[in-house]
Amino acid sequence: MSTPEPSPSAYRYSSDLAGDIERRWQDRWEAEGTFEAPNPTGDLAGDVTGEKFFIMDMFPYPSGAGLHVGHPLGYIATDVIGRYRRMQGDNVLHALGYDAFGLPAEIHAVQTGEHPRTNTEANMVNMRRQLRRLGLAHDPRRSFATIDPEFMRWTQWIFIQIFESWYDVEAGRARPISELIEKLGTSDPHVIDQHRLAYIDESPVNWCPALGTVLSNEEVTPEGRSERGNFPVFPRNLRQWKMRITAYADRLIDDLDRMDWPESVKLMQRNWIGRSHGAEVSFAVAGSGSRIDVFTTRPDTLFGATYVVLAPEHELVASLTADAWPEGVTPSWTGGAATPAEAIAGYRAAAASKSDVERQENRDKTGVFTGSYAVNPVNGESIPVFIADYVLTGYGTGAIMAVPGQDDRDWEFAEKFDLPIIRTVQPSDGFDGDAYKGEGPAINSSHGDLDINGLGIAEAKAAVIAWLEQHGAGHGTTTYRLRDWLFSRQRYWGEPFPIVFDEDGSPIALPDSMLPVQLPEVPDYLPKTFEPDDAESEPEPPLARVPDWVNVELDLGDGLKKYRRETNTMPNWAGSSWYELRYADPHNTEAMVDPANEAYWLGPRQAGDTGGVDLYIGGVEHAVLHLLYARFWHKVLFDLGHLSSEEPFRRLFNQGYIQAYAYTDSRGVYVPAEDVIEHVDGSDTTYTYDGKPVSREYGKMGKSLKNIVTPDEMYDAYGADTFRVYEMSMGPLDVSRPWETRAVVGAQRFLQRVWRLLVDEDSGESLASDDALDAETLHVLHRTIEGVRADMDEMRFNTAIAKLIELTNHLTKAGVRSRDALEPLVLMTAPLAPHVAEELWAKLGHAESLARAPYPVADPAHLVEQSVTCVVQVLGKVRGKLEVSPDISDEELQALALAEPNVVKSIDGREVRKVIVRAPKLVSIVV
RNA sequence: GCCGAAGUGGUGGAACGGUAGACACGCGGCGCUUAGGACGCCGUGCCUCAGGGUGUGCGGGUUCGAAUCCCGCCUUCGGCACCA
């Protein structure tokens, strides 16, 4: 089809030559251990000079689909930063491991019968190959996978640390459970187990029958479906492992202020934890001794509480259900039932059968009256008690005081059920037909010894809380949206729990000597799944089907006894909740990390510093899942004295995504994006595939969208260096951008120009000269060095590349081949395009790798401008330009500006009213 | 609905409150070539023959001067969503 290439120059920087150079340098780096970082102690101990710099990427999952060009974006960025820091003398720790437990491998195993480990390891081999070809400067000795027995051992060890500890609220930190046993004077598991940070609890959890497992709140979408697979999720009461992350809610929120993280991520975590300050108020139930505790953020509106609502599942509902409807009950309150018991039973049954999805979709207010009344503590009013599903069981106390005057939901309910509405806050511009949630003085809020009328919201809240506390009717409190972390899964492909149960069913941690607990072989990997809408069935873990493994006889210090193993496995978040620690000391067999290595790589730099990884780059999709879990584990380990750092990630940066166009034909079927032809006609652009029009959409890259571009294609067509430069030049790192293969050539042209400056394309010989640089080139060079350094420091790789291109274009145009210019150019290019830079560095006569060659520093003497262009504005419009000396005086510049012919013409004889002079760059004249 | 981020040429994107559009893709022209490619040089926001006018989502404002700061809209994307 194509004519043969007419013998290109032998040393032209083609994709083939780039490939040769890249492979050669990758082999040499590996052979020489160029990027190995020494530790202070242990098997990787070495000379730890220079400042330490620990940079990390988010753990990849070794997917069978392989990589597309979007995946390496963050890896390239961290590599560029790591290389840049290394050239400044830092001891850089950069490595990459694999988060290898996960559902896709399990699904693959179910479909093929192949062990998930086999498939996962094959995927890791392929991914390592694809990433090695990028030339990432990782310390290969520090790579690991979460499925490695030696890694899993420490994951299980950490679980035991969490299991064997409790949260001391007074001390504000976790402590070993032994200290609680001592404090309480009992080791009774029924007492102690309730305090553990990892505990078994029967409570409503997210049950996903289609996946056959329960899920954490974080793994359920706002639509009430599973994040993986989009299946319906039901609330079920089940006995499951949980982690007491709620104990850390305050610290998880407060310590965000001490970290250099994107504000958006901090906000998402704050919202997820959802701290609200308010009060618990106790309502006596009329004619009975019991009380209903409600949580409210607006105790100032207590005088406007006109009814009370309990969640349908609330434990007091049964005792509050009256024997008969009171005389003259409002008909709409009864749900048409003859007795309260019948109404309540009917309502609860209907609520229980609703999935979260249905609850989301139907927001009409529903509810029934219990037949009981509660007494408002501030004014003694009797108000009816309802149950309604708009009150959620897991938040606050599962009961509310309804204040329709100041709450939309209560307003809606009150309208529907003809309940009274009392306004207790006065808006400045009058009431409309709605609840008023704004600021204003309290009204209608006085009774007996409590009068808050006229107070603003904050003062009124304080006054009511004080009154409640004084009268034993409530107290100020704080609640959280965050729930404890559901930690068990009914899956095969995860870490087994290092837990056995004794004959009484109490959980017991296995001793360190029995770790790791390995996964047994199983006849098949199939989790027991159910119809997606089967809310009734019980989950059944695959490990429960291996009785030989489950039932064991062990000596745990008091002789051989029979035990039963825990058959759930950990969620796939476990490994990634602590992996940053293992990079610091990957082979340690005595500890998860040696304290000296942890202190060196993660420890605080000064008082008040949280410590942690110096820079963590990854996608924003983990804003609340992984990043919250990892912070929680890290804090527990800190509390227990295993770590010097309080947080895992001192600085976080979210890179954007590489997106792509996809095309669909008239039937809506995706067509291969690479075969779509673009037609530009004036301002109209249309697209065709196979001669027929197709429509374009913008979004992710995906196999099913037929728009995947792989790194391998880029390596073949351009080489890894070009691919790296292109990805870094596309735009700011934190912004998503569309992939455009045809634009990649620009990066290649840049590298070719650098290459041609230095290498004869026919002989391969160096063309570098020892000529001195002319004044202009010196100036351009040093301005570039200064600008590129500033850009690199701020991770603005796109503008750094633009400046390098400008320098290269200048040298090309001026015919400058002096090594005084070429050496700094090569060094500045090195972090971005390391292979070609190494090759050119060698051609310049250096035997050593440039990995630790000093990054160029600008000489201030050459930054001084010879002359500056001064802009003269008249009424804000540019009317003239002057070439002036940089140190010109304001007076002289003003005189020159006012004399400039075009400026004189623009002033047109009008009176000059004001002249603003910003020497030497600007003069602004007002007439 | 609430919270947050962002809107700049045909495209990706540059611009301490101070020459809007750096750099790159694409496109056009010239050179070198039998030709194409590659390479080099020049041009390229829009309107206009020119001089000039105009231009950063829309409408106001602050300022000598606004893409940038303030107010109000519109659009897109992301998070949360019956959380009391």
Image (spheres, helix red, strand yellow):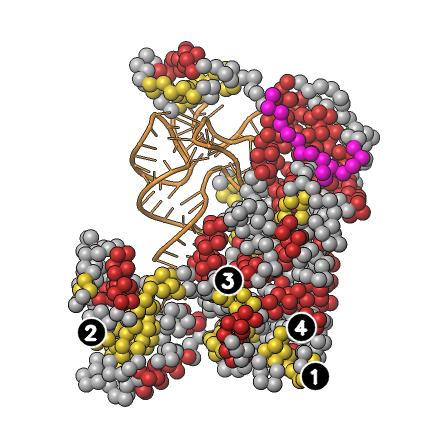
Q: Which residue is mark 2?
A: A381
| Magenta stretch encompasses residue A853 | yes
The answer to whether the residues at label 2 and label 3 have Cβ atoms under 8 Å apart is no
Residue type for callout 2: Glu
Residue at mark 2 to residue at mark 3: CA–CA distance: 43 Å
Question: Which x, y percent locates residue A875?
Answer: 36, 22
Residue drawn at x 61%, y 82% is: A502
| Disc 1: host chain | A
The boundaries of the magenta stretch are A846-861
* Residue identifier under label 1: A560
Say whether mark 1 and mark 2 are on the same chain: yes
Residue farthest to the right?
A763
Task: Tell me, for residue A511, which label it has, or none.
Answer: 4
Q: Are marks 1 and 3 in contact (CB under 8 Å)?
A: no
Local crowd size for mark 3, using a 10 Å CA cut-off: few (<14), some (14–19), many (≥20): some
In whole angstroms, how far apart are the C-alphas of marks 4 and 3? 24 Å
Q: Chain of mark 4?
A: A
Q: Is residue A859 left or right of residue B35?
A: left
Please state the chain letter of the residue tagged with numbered disc 2 in the rendered image.
Answer: A
The structure residue drawn at horizontal position 76% and vertical position 21%, both measured from the top left corner, is: A770
Instruction: Tell whether label 4 touches label 1 (CB within 8 Å).
Output: no
Q: What amino acid is at disc 3?
A: Arg
Quarter of the picture holding the C terminus of chain A: top left
Dot 4 or dot 3: first in sequence order is: 3
Q: Residues within 10 Å of mark 4 (few under 14, many from 20)?
A: some
Let me know if residue A724 appears in the view. no
Residue A443 in percent (x, y) is at 18, 60
Amino acid at the residue labelled 1:
Leu
Vertical position of residue A425 compared to residue A472: above or below: above
The residue labelled by disc 3 is: A173
Three-letter residue code for mark 4: Pro
